[in-house]
Amino acid sequence: MQYKEIWALDERDPFAPPEGGESVADVASRLANILLMTEAECEGYAILLVAHGDPLQIFQTILHATIHSDSFEKKGILDTNLDAVISAPVLSQHRKFSLFTGELRRVM
């Protein structure tokens, strides 16, 4: 599959994996778990994440959705909001957060 086909699939159904790959929901769940562990271990520190573009834009999508949800609590970004953000309406929008090659972006 070409990127355009994968991105179209991601938008149609973020729970459907492309052939030989992970779905957006799979990546989001993995990233959410990493964020929960990082929050617990690195409280009070600045954190730099380095990855390929798609995981970073999926990561920013779940952060954005969590921070802008009605149930956002300051005690932990995803503690109470994970079920709300790992959803088709949220995840299908991850291309809105695409990055340029080598781009640095502050997300919080």
Image: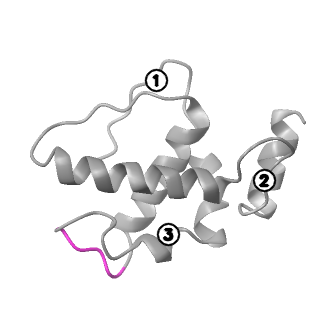
Crowding around mark 1 (Cα neighbors within 10 Å: few <14, some 14 to 19, many 20+) is few
Q: Mark 3 is on which residue type? A: Val
Give residue 77's position: percent from left, percent from top. Answer: 29, 63
Q: Name the residue furthest left.
A: 44
Give residue 19's position: percent from left, percent from top. Answer: 87, 45
Crowding around mark 2 (Cα neighbors within 10 Å: few <14, some 14 to 19, many 20+) is some
Q: Image height check: is 51 above or below 20?
A: above
Magenta stretch: give its range: 70-74
At 52% from the left edge and 58% from the top edge, which residue is drawn?
29
Q: Mark 1 is on which residue type? A: Glu
Mark 1 or mark 2: which comes first in sequence? Answer: 2
CA separation in Å, label 1 and label 2:
27 Å
CA separation in Å, label 2 and label 3:
18 Å
**Residue placed under numbered mark 3 in the picture:** 85
Give residue 43's position: percent from left, percent from top. Answer: 13, 49
CA separation in Å, label 1 and label 3:
25 Å
- Residue 58 lies in magenta, yes or no? no
Q: Name the residue furthest top.
A: 102
Mark 1: secondary structure: loop
Q: Mark 2 is on which residue type? A: Pro
